[in-house]
Amino acid sequence: MDLSDQKHFTVVDYVIFAVLLAASMAIGLYYALSGGRQRTTQEFLMADRSMKCLPVSLSLIASFQSAVAIIGVPAEIYTHGTQYWFIGCAYFLGLLIPAHVFIPVLYRLRISSAYQYLEMRFSKTVRICGTLTFIFQMVIYMGVCVYTPAFALNAVTGFELWGTVLATGLVCTLYTTLGGLKAVIWTDVFQTVVMFAGQLAVIVVGVLRTGGVSEVWRKVWEGNRISGLDLNPDPTERHTFWTLGVGGIFLMLSLYGVNQAQVQRYLSARTEKEAVRSCYMVFPSLQLALALSCVMGLVMFARYCGEDHSDKLGSSSRDAMVIYFVMDMLQGLPGLPGLFVACLFSAALSTISSAFNSLATVTMEDLIKPHFPAMTEARATLLSKALAMSYGLLCLAMAYLTHLMGDSVLQVALKIFGMVGGPILGLFCLGMFFPWANSIGAVAGLGAGLTLSFWIGVGSIVTRSSGTRSLPPDCRVALLSDNTTAAIQTALSNVTLRSESLRQHTLSQAQ
């Protein structure tokens, strides 16, 4: 199949994609017009602390199971093998520790922002520093999340890039602003189901069209994409067990332990027990999500054998190959390409809606309310909605900045969370585990941590250094022994036939 040809949606695909956006908007409108109609900050920002564990757990998954993961992980597996899968080893401790350390402390304080704890433990200065650091982290990350699916879709189908970014950002901004945290959580539930269904459809069809499970396994094994346990202690390596299985624990703690987007969901649960239970329920779902993304990358490799078609796709990023693979596999099956694109944009919507809501919360609770204690509830709620909308518009600007960064989206996302998430996690751990620490030490530690992590992270982006040990570019390299054997056998057969023919000719001449 000519990879220079663009893939196209059918009417059914467009309908499915439109239904996703319409359903998300409908959920936002429902919660805007029902119950308390989002008239208080507790309802708008905290869902009245009335949520059950199932929707909370699914929302916890959706919040960071973004388009970055759905596109970035298969592209990572396709290019570098299954080493990234070892990050699943970090999920156990990365969720167990938040469930029994961070959730009990934060839930019992009955706070709205995780950074209120920092003022209680240290000082107002530490609280503001933590809040501003979180805002910086999430503003950049949501730009990555909204840009990723639009970019990949544009590279393969010719979808208008910035039109798609605009539509995604505006729909998400509207339902988040109208429906508050309840709308965000219930749209996350709907979008999680769509995400799993879309990935599963691609994997099943891809395996069938590639020749079955055994053929897929043969190609990925011979193509050297099944990675063993890499215990190399070199920190400059792209991925090893130490950076994924051990370092991943700290990534998970920064996400599921102290990140406001996740903490806000814990705090919206009816009871502390429900909050802890929701954290437990995340573990199997995250393992499933990781497995689906990794298997999708393996099936993709079995289909294309690692060949680089990015030049024909008009993009230097392997991320566009994921969308091409989906459109290639699902062609002739009306509705399924639309389902996967809906899956992709569900991931984006769930992540950026969580970002808008959490950013509005910390801005209101940490930066505005302390200076205006006499503000009425109605005015505070209206201002919270305005903040959510403002962050939505800012997200669109950050998408353009992401466009300029140019790196693999997975690497960019991990760098952002590594550079900022680590120092914030350190700040909370300092407060909880070191009773003699004071506010001066907390601010100094946060500043030193950010300086060091930015020096490493920005340097990596600028120099494009990823410590990558290249794998064979395609499975033809790995299959060379089979092809060589066949060629040698053919050549020997030809030599034998020619020798026999020459011998017979010589005998006939002699006679």
Image (tube, rainbow, N blue to C red):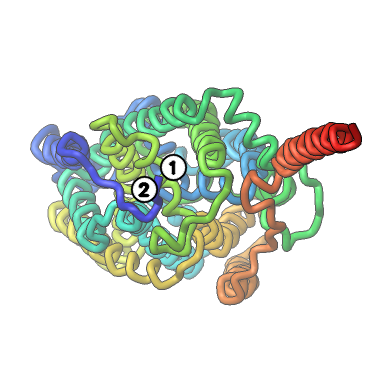
In the displayed orientation, state which residue is furthest to the right: 510
Q: Is residue 358 left or right of residue 414?
A: left
Name the quadrant containing residue 327.
top left
Mark closer to the chain start, 1 or 2: 1
Q: Is residue 246 left or right of residue 188?
A: right
Q: How many marks?
A: 2
Whether residues under marks 1 and 2 lie with C-beta atoms below 8 angstroms apart, the answer is yes
Q: Quick one: 495 or 354, which is closer to the camera?
A: 495
State the residue at coordinates (62%, 65%). 438
In the displayed orientation, state which residue is furthest to the front: 511
Q: Is residue 319 left or right of residue 385?
A: right
Tell me how far mark 1 sits from mark 2, CA to CA. 7 Å
Name the quadrant containing residue 102.
top right
Query: Residue under circle 2?
Result: 351
Residue 24 in picture, x, y percent from top left? 20, 39
Asked if 437 appears above or below 70 in the picture, the reply is below
Residue 223 in picture, x, y percent from top left? 67, 41
Residue 226 in picture, x, y percent from top left? 68, 38
User: Looking at the picture, which amino acid does disc 2 mark?
Assistant: Thr
Q: Which quadrant: the N terminus?
A: top left
Residue 194 in picture, x, y percent from top left? 32, 32
Query: Residue under circle 1?
Result: 65
